[in-house]
Image (cartoon, coloured by chain):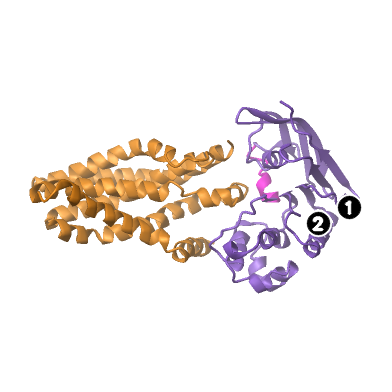
Chain colours: A purple, B orange
């Protein structure tokens, strides 16, 4: 098992001349889950985007295995799966076509979705909608389709923005089981959430964000 | 992988036929409005119709490409692309080509109908056809670049075209010159080669520029 250590040191972020957050620090290694919590608008999504390299930092460093994520040698994207708040799905494609396409983007597995699609679609009980266009689905089902990517990836770092939103109780429990499996097999998870489900995990960490008063 | 990307792009256009038919309808609607304004001056219309076709083509590509990345941005697909370890330049290249093929190429196919409507001679029609074939992919690529540049700005419907129109000028100049040369009985090889060079410069470099632009735009 490859060891992964994430070190976030004193990071700050500015968007449209507004300071979103500053002096955020934490570290995380295999088998741990980090919950990013805080009120709306405190910068949880922006922090998650900075961790994925989408959002530029104003100050501070993010290192994975002692290599800055800006360093081409770090190549952190080969270990990272990000599912954002907006799901990253194509509205004009069916559930099956979306997952088939997204599977091709995930180089950590070899067509696992295509080979075992019915098994993966049953996990979140979306198999009966597999030929529905994503634009025809409810928000909850869209979220389930996006989260289905977690089932066929072999990536170790999962970064998820409010994964529990719109999900029913059954799906929430299934997702937590999936998180536990991932943590127990040496993966690590960073997730923003408004629901505290840390009691399921032995090694969980919190990051409470307050937002910046201007 | 390539066949799945290709299939996905094709489905996107075929499942929403508006993408294909609306530019075509818009183009022919605008072209047929011009004679109503100019009046029944046949010689004047015959003289200016190549210019009208090109201006209308510019409007069509602008309208077509202004919101090119809007859905992908709103649905989080751009973020998905940028956090994938897979190279997205090839996808962006395919998106340009397929957008051109499904939205602009049908217009070029129907250009002979315009020649019948306005009594354009065959040699001028051939020049218009050739310049559109070489010039319109450049317009589409630049239009998509404008869309990528303004992706993070709300109510950006006019900013993209304002930025991109100046980049259309070289294509417009060489296309107009190529048609003018043919109508004066002169060869237009030079202008065609220049258009071809611009096309061969823009198409391979645009995906890299788009990736960089999307990364900057999504940051704001």
Which residue lies most toward the top here? A214
Q: Against A102, is B69 above or below?
A: above
Q: How many marks?
A: 2
Which residue is at a point 34% across and 35% down the rendered structure image? B166
Magenta range is A71-80
In x, y percent, where is residue B119?
A: 12, 57
For label 2, the crowd category at 10 Å Cα-Cα, with few meaning under 14, some 14 to 19 and many 20 or more, is many
In this orientation, which residue lies closer to the viewer: B173 or B201?
B173
Give the side of residue A185 with respect to residue B213, left or right: right
In this orientation, which residue lies closer to the viewer: A175 or A108?
A175
The answer to whether the residue labelled 1 contacts the one labelled 2, judged by CB atoms less than 8 Å apart, is: yes
The chain to which mark 1 is attached is A
Which numbered dot is residue A201? Answer: 1
In x, y percent, where is residue B99?
A: 41, 55
Give the side of residue A91 with respect to residue A62, left or right: left
Asked if residue B90 is among those painted magenta in the image, a careful observer would answer no
The chain to which mark 2 is attached is A
Counting residues from the N terminus, which is met first, the one under dot 1 or under dot 2?
Answer: 2
In x, y percent, where is residue B114?
A: 20, 58
Assign the C terminus of chain B to one quadrant of the image. Answer: top right
In x, y percent, where is residue B135?
A: 29, 48
Which residue is at a point 60% across and 47% down the rendered structure image? B79
Q: Is residue B88 visible?
A: no
Q: Against B124, is A13 above or below?
A: above
In terms of secondary structure, where does tag 1 sit?
loop
Q: Against A47, is A104 above or below?
A: below
Q: Is residue A23 visible?
A: yes
In terms of secondary structure, where does tag 2 sit?
helix
**Label 1 to label 2, Cα distance in Å?**
9 Å
For label 1, the crowd category at 10 Å Cα-Cα, with few meaning under 14, some 14 to 19 and many 20 or more, is some
Which numbered dot is residue A179? Answer: 2
């Amino acid at each position: 098992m490859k060891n992964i250590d994430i070190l976030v040191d004193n990071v700050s972020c500015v968007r449209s001349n507004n300071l979103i957050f500053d002096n955020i620090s934490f570290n995380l290694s295999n088998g741990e889950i980090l919950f990013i919590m805080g009120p709306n608008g405190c910068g949880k999504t922006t922090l998650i985007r900075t961790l994925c390299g989408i959002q530029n930092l104003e100050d501070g460093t993010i290192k994975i295995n002692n290599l800055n994520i800006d360093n081409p040698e770090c190549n952190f994207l080969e270990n990272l799966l990000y599912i954002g708040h907006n799901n990253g799905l194509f509205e004009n494609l069916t559930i099956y076509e979306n997952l088939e396409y997204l599977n091709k983007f995930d180089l950590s597995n070899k067509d696992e979705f295509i080979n075992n699609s019915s098994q993966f679609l049953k996990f979140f009980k979306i198999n009966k909608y597999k030929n529905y266009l994503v634009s025809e689905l409810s928000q909850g089902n869209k979220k389930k389709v996006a989260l289905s990517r977690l089932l066929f990836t072999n990536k170790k770092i999962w970064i998820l923005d409010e994964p529990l939103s719109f999900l029913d109780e059954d799906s929430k429990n299934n997702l937590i089981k999936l998180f536990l499996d991932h943590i127990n097999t040496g993966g690590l998870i960073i997730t923003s959430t408004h629901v505290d489900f840390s009691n399921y995990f032995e090694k969980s960490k919190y990051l409470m964000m307050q937002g910046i008063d201007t | 992988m390539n066949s799945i990307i290709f299939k996905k792009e094709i489905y996107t256009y075929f499942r929403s036929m508006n993408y294909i038919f609306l530019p075509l309808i818009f183009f022919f609607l605008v072209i047929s409005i011009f004679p109503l304004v100019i009046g029944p001056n046949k010689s004047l219309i015959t003289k200016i119709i190549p210019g009208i076709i090109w201006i209308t083509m510019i409007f069509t590509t602008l309208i077509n490409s202004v919101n090119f990345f809007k859905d992908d941005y709103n649905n989080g697909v751009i973020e998905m692309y940028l956090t994938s370890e897979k190279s997205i330049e090839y996808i962006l290249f395919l998106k340009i080509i397929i957008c051109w093929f499904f939205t602009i190429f049908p217009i070029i196919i129907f250009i002979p109908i315009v020649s019948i409507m306005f009594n354009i001679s065959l040699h001028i029609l051939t020049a218009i056809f050739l310049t559109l074939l070489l010039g319109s992919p450049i317009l589409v690529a630049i239009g998509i670049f404008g869309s990528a540049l303004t992706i993070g700005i709300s109510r950006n419907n006019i900013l993209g075209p304002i930025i991109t129109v100046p980049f259309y000028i070289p294509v417009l100049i060489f296309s107009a010159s190529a048609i003018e040369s043919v109508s004066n009985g002169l060869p237009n090889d030079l202008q065609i080669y220049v258009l071809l060079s611009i096309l061969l410069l823009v198409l391979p470099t645009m995906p890299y520029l788009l990736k960089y632009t999307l990364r900057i735009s999504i940051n704001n």
